Image (cartoon, grey):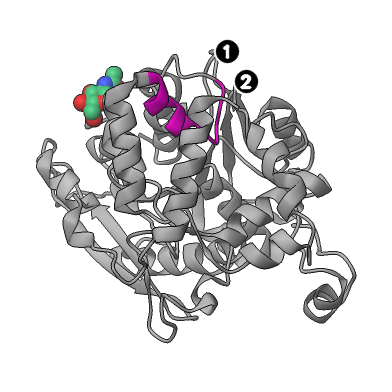
């Protein structure tokens, strides 16, 4: 077995075994708002409580200190992170390259979401973090409950009738879930920008599919029963120390830690941006999020969680989970995908496009080597992705 893979596997298992959930200490890390402030930008922290009790943290860059535009119109935009990630992913390459700052400097009111279960959203007003009930969710709930709650809050706070949205990876999946399951939200989206869009997984080449897919994608199977409703890869000091030490030992181990789930090389990655990211990643997710993705890989469908025939019948009134109906998505939506994405690659984006009748645009990043994580950490992501996004958002605002 590849030695790098061994180190990573060991740190994952160690991380799962030794994670002290209640012990997690936010005061030990540099949080999103401190990062923003350190670059001179104004920032605010907001909390949104969902109908089922999760307290979600939204960070905000309300305006740009460079533009001094606090008294001007600033259309809001929500940025939503991917699996194992958090709001820091929109900041790690700094003001000259990362999307959150570029949007603030383009005159937008930037809100950074955090899904239930990640390091910034680990409270529920009714359920303890240590209860399996806390972790009984996946990206279906992030899409149908968390994102709508954040959007309602932001629109109420800013007085705007519509919001722009950009998501990476699972942040795209949750958007597609929201607009197909709660189509009334289409009217609230001025434009949607899907970076590395993930809905279909037939062609995923990441080793993770073949390694874990057969184990956990069978509902009722032993692995599934062991893993359901638990925290997956919690952020913890041991994991981070291991990765950090391996970064000092060898750059390639460090880089591999990041591309573990998104393999496909790292020729575009900004190494400093990676070391910023590792401070708060992996950020905590429910195992059900990973299991649900693997179920999609197995079924070739974009559909709800498969609980097995009995519970499916109780929940959905049918043996198999229902598909998400992408024809209900009418908000103007742009896809930004890349050839070298080992999780959500070009053939699977083709399937998404075929099933998405009202899709506005299917933009493909014009660089062969660009991969899944490059949307967050590539040295060249400004020219290839972020500038094109801002250009499109500006066009909706008549700018
Ligand atoms: C790389 O990341 C560092 C750390 O955030 C940042 O200062 C730098 O501007 C980034 N460079 C590029 C080209 O992305």
- Where does label 2 land, which residue? 339
Residue 260 falls inside the magenta stretch: yes
Secondary structure beneath dot 1 equals loop
Range of magenta residues: 252-264
- Single out the residue that lies furthest toward the bottom: 126
Residue 351 falls inside the magenta stretch: no
Q: Is residue 220 above or below residue 99?
A: below
Residue 4 visible (yes or no): yes
Residue 328 x, y percent position in the rendering = 72, 56
Q: Is residue 87 above or below residue 150?
A: above
Quarter residue 157 falls in: bottom left
On residue 194, the disc is none
Residue 75 visible (yes or no): no
- Where does label 1 land, which residue? 368
Question: Which residue is found at the position 19% from the left and 47% from the top?
Answer: 63
Q: Quadrant of ligand 1?
A: top left
- Determine whether label 2 and label 1 are within 8 Å by CB: yes
Quarter residue 107 falls in: top left
């Amino acid at each position: 077995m590849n030695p790098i893979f061994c180190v990573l596997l060991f740190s994952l298992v160690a991380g799962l075994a030794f994670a002290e959930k209640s012990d997690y200490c936010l005061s030990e890390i540099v949080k999103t708002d401190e990062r923003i402030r350190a670059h001179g930008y104004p920032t605010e922290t907001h909390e949104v409580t969902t109908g089922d009790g999760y307290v979600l943290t939204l960070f905000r860059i309300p305006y740009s200190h460079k533009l001094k535009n606090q008294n001007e119109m600033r259309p809001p935009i929500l940025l939503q992170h991917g699996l194992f990630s958090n709001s820091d992913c929109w900041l790690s390459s700094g003001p000259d390259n990362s999307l959150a700052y570029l949007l603030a400097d383009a005159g937008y009111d930037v809100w950074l979401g955090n899904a239930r279960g990640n390091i910034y959203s680990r409270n529920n007003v009714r359920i303890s973090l240590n209860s399996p009930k806390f972790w009984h969710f996946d990206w279906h709930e992030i899409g149908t409950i968390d994102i709508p709650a954040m959007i309602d809050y932001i629109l109420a706070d800013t007085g705007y009738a519509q919001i722009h949205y950009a998501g990476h990876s699972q942040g795209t999946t949750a958007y597609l879930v929201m607009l197909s399951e709660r189509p009334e939200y289409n009217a609230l989206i001025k434009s949607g920008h899907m970076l590395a869009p993930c809905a279909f997984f037939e062609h995923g080449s990441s080793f993770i599919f073949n390694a874990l897919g057969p184990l956990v994608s069978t509902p009722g199977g032993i692995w599934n029963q062991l893993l359901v409703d638990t925290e997956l890869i919690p952020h913890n000091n041991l994991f981070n120390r291991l990765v950090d030490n391996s970064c000092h030992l060898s750059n390639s181990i460090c880089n591999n830690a990041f591309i573990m789930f998104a393999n496909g090389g790292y020729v575009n990655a900004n190494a400093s941006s990676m070391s910023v990211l590792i401070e708060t990643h992996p950020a905590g997710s429910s195992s059900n999020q990973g299991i649900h993705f693997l179920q999609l890989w197995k079924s070739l469908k974009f559909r709800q969680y498969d609980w097995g025939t009995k519970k499916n019948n109780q929940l959905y009134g049918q043996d198999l989970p229902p598909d998400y109906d992408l024809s209900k998505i009418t908000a103007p939506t742009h896809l930004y995908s890349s050839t070298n994405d080992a999780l959500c690659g070009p053939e699977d984006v083709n399937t998404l496009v075929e099933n998405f009748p009202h899709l506005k645009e299917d933009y493909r990043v014009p660089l062969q080597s660009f991969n899944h994580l490059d949307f967050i950490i590539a040295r060249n992501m400004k020219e290839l992705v972020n500038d094109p996004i801002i250009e499109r958002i500006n066009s909706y605002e008549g700018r």
